[in-house]
Image: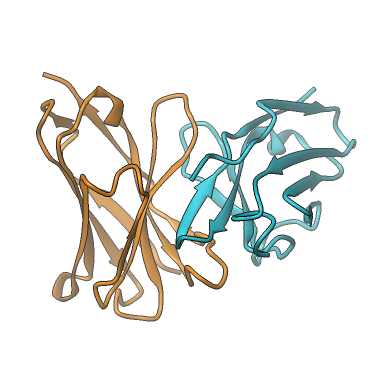
Amino acid sequence: QSALTQPPSASGSPGQSVTISCTGTSSDVGGYNYVSWYQQHPGKAPKLIIFEVSKRPSGVPDRFSGSKSGNTASLTVSGLQGEDEADYYCSSYGSTNNLVFGGGTSLTVL
Amino acid sequence: QVHLQESGPGLVMPSGTLSLTCTVSDSSISSPYYWSWIRQPPGKGLEWIGTMYYSGATYYKSSLKSRVTMSVVLSRNQFSLDLSSVTAADTAIYYCARLPSLRNGGYLDSWGHGVLVTVSS
């Protein structure tokens, strides 16, 4: 149950796109289409923004999109806005009925 | 819209037991959802602790399994977390959350606001 690997930081200017990667193994990310992404603003609880690799909950802007290739999942934020500045965490279901999170990526809007 | 609220002591003595309760509102805890605990040490990332179904089935992170117990109180629409033999490393914000399914999806769609628990003498 090792943590998934995310870059510690990412950045982009308003209007640009940024992609955050999340690398696991064939026992989690690569083995199931059960990757989710969470957005967390300072002092707030995490909020689900992507589930099952690429699905968006109701109310989440379509600027947020997810994908997966092999053992690596990705979150893309298009048309960056100031409110997108937050920490982002990936998560995956794992083969032993567990959930594993990534270490988190701090997104800065320049 | 389901609402979850964590409650419990904010300070626990080293070697003691951390006990938290999550009260679920606007949804029955016996509905077909799973219920989870996640923690976040100050300034660090999220860590899954465990997940349970109202019937009593439990799933724990392997490294915490020997110290964790999750249970449900149907009459109060609550579920709880007990973490024994705590150390300073267990200091964290503890969140409760809901999963529509563990084996089919594994995503947490509703979260409580979190409660900070500090382990210190």
Residue closest to the eye, A30 or A9: A30
Q: Is residue A10 placed above or below B94 in the rendered structure?
A: above
Q: Viewed as shown, does residue B56 lie left or right of A6?
A: left
Residue at the extreme top: B121
Place of residue A95 in the rendered image (x, y in percent of width and height, measured from the top left):
52, 61
Q: Is residue A101 above or below residue B57?
A: above
Residue B36, by quadrant, is: bottom left
Q: Across the whole image, how many numbered discs are drawn on residues?
A: 0
Task: Point out residue B119 in the picture as x, y percentages from the top left corner.
Answer: 20, 26
Answer with left or right where residue B2 lies relative to residue A14: left
From the image, state the color of chain B: orange
Residue at 63% across, 34% down: A86
Which one is in front, B6 or A36? A36
Specify the quadrant that holds the N terminus of chain B: bottom left
Indicate the position of residue B120 as horizontal and vertical percent values: 16, 21
Q: How is the image coloured?
A: by chain
Above or below for A83 versus B56: above
* Residue at (19, 33) in percent of width and height: B10
Residue B35 drawn at (x, y percent) = 36, 64
Extreme residue in the right direction: A16
**Which residue is at a point 87% across and 43% down the rendered structure image?**
A79
- Of residue A49 and residue A6, the one placed in the foreground of this image is A6
Left or right of B97, for residue B104 = right
Chain identifier, colour cyan = A
